[in-house]
Every structure is written in structure tokens, then in C-alpha cells.
Amino acid sequence: MSEKTLAVQIVMPQHCNGYAIPRLFGGQIMAWIDVVGAVAARRYCGRAVTTVSVDNLTFLKPAHLNDTVVQEAWVTWTGRTSLEVRVDSLVEKLDGSRELINRAYAVFVALDEQERPVPVPPFTPETTEEKLEWAAAEERRKRRLQK
């Protein structure tokens, strides 16, 4: 597995909707996903990157006001100039336990100084989990290209 990038946020009032029990806005978690995903991609390829797509964004459970949200991001697939990053978002309880609330797969393209696409280092899956992620990424790529 490529090295994980971690981000940690506390859900504050400005991150929430106006419900009686304030919940984290979906758009806010999407913004955090884009940032931590981009950091993981930049670290992996040593280049600036731009977001191309978010192929899969699944909201499993909510996060609420004052929750701690931990995000883990890592590269799951590389092409010639693009790479896919998986971002898991988890609510961390005060006892340290974590529960998955969101999973997203974002695709980035590496850029040179003139903002043109450049090759990325190839990622070679080694573990069973990495190979499964790679195969799933290939399927997502096929669907993107068909659109």
C-alpha cells in the first residue's frame, strides 16, 4: 500500500446544517476529501496535481457537531499521468474507536510547471488488498472512459 496521508478535523458549527441535531454538510466533507486526496497524490508523485473526477462518493453515516473526523488517503492505482486515491473518512470517538462514515475514490492528474500532464511513478500492487483495489480501480476507469 502506498503511504497513508492523514487529516483530522473537528466538526464546528460552520461545517454543519441547521437541523435540530447539527450534521456535517456533505459538501464540507467533499472539500476535505479533495484536499487530503490531493496531498496523498502530490506526495506520491512529487508533483502538483489537479482533480479530474470523484468516481465514487458514498455517505454511510453522518458526522455531527463536535465529532472528530479522521481521513486516511492512499494511492490505489496509477495510469500514465493520472492516479486514483482512496479516501476513507471516519468519526473518531473520545475512546479512540473509529467508525467509517464515508468512502471516496478521487482521480488526479500530475502537472508540470506549465500545468501540462506529466507521467507519474507506476504503482505496483503487492498485497491481496492492493490487488483488489487495483482491479476495482480499473473497472471504475473503464466506466469513466465509456461516458
Image (cartoon, rainbow, N blue to C red):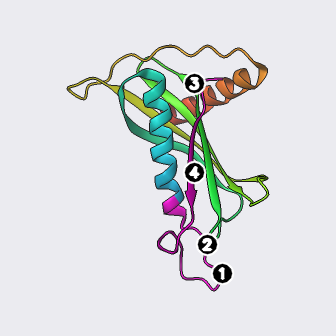
Residue at the left extreme of this rendering: 114
- Whole-angstrom CA distance, mark 2 to mark 1, is 8 Å
Q: Determine which of the numbered discs, if any, sits on residue 124 in the image.
A: none
Q: Earlier in the sequence, mark 3 or mark 1?
A: 1
Q: Is residue 121 above or below residue 54?
A: above
Mark 2 crowd level (few <14, some 14–19, many ≥20, 10 Å Cα)? some
* Mark whose residue sits in front, 3 or 1: 1
Q: Quadrant of the N terminus?
A: top right
Does dot 2 land on a helix, a strand or a loop? loop
- Whole-angstrom CA distance, mark 2 to mark 3, is 34 Å
Q: Amino acid at mark 1?
A: Ile
Q: Residue at x 57, y 62 (%)?
A: 10
Return the residue nearer the eye: 24 or 106. 24
- Whole-angstrom CA distance, mark 2 to mark 4, is 14 Å
Does residue 147 appear in the picture of this structure? no
- Whole-angstrom CA distance, mark 3 to mark 4, is 24 Å
Mark 4 crowd level (few <14, some 14–19, many ≥20, 10 Å Cα)? some
- Say which residue label 1 marks: 21
Position of residue 128 measured from the top left corner of the image (x, y, whole percent):
78, 20
Q: Determine which of the numbered discs, if any, sits on residue 8 in the image.
A: 4
- Say which residue label 3 marks: 77
Position of residue 12 measured from the top left corner of the image (x, y, whole percent):
53, 69
Looking at the image, do the residues carrying marks 2 and 1 touch, with CB atoms under 8 Å apart?
Answer: yes
Position of residue 115 measured from the top left corner of the image (x, y, whole percent):
25, 29
* Mark whose residue sits in front, 3 or 4: 4
Instruction: Give the residues in magenta.
Output: 1-28
In the image, 10: left or right of 53? right
Q: Earlier in the sequence, mark 2 or mark 3?
A: 2
Does dot 1 land on a helix, a strand or a loop? loop
Q: Residue at x 71, y 62 (%)?
A: 61
Q: Determine which of the numbered discs, if any, sits on residue 65 in the image.
A: 2
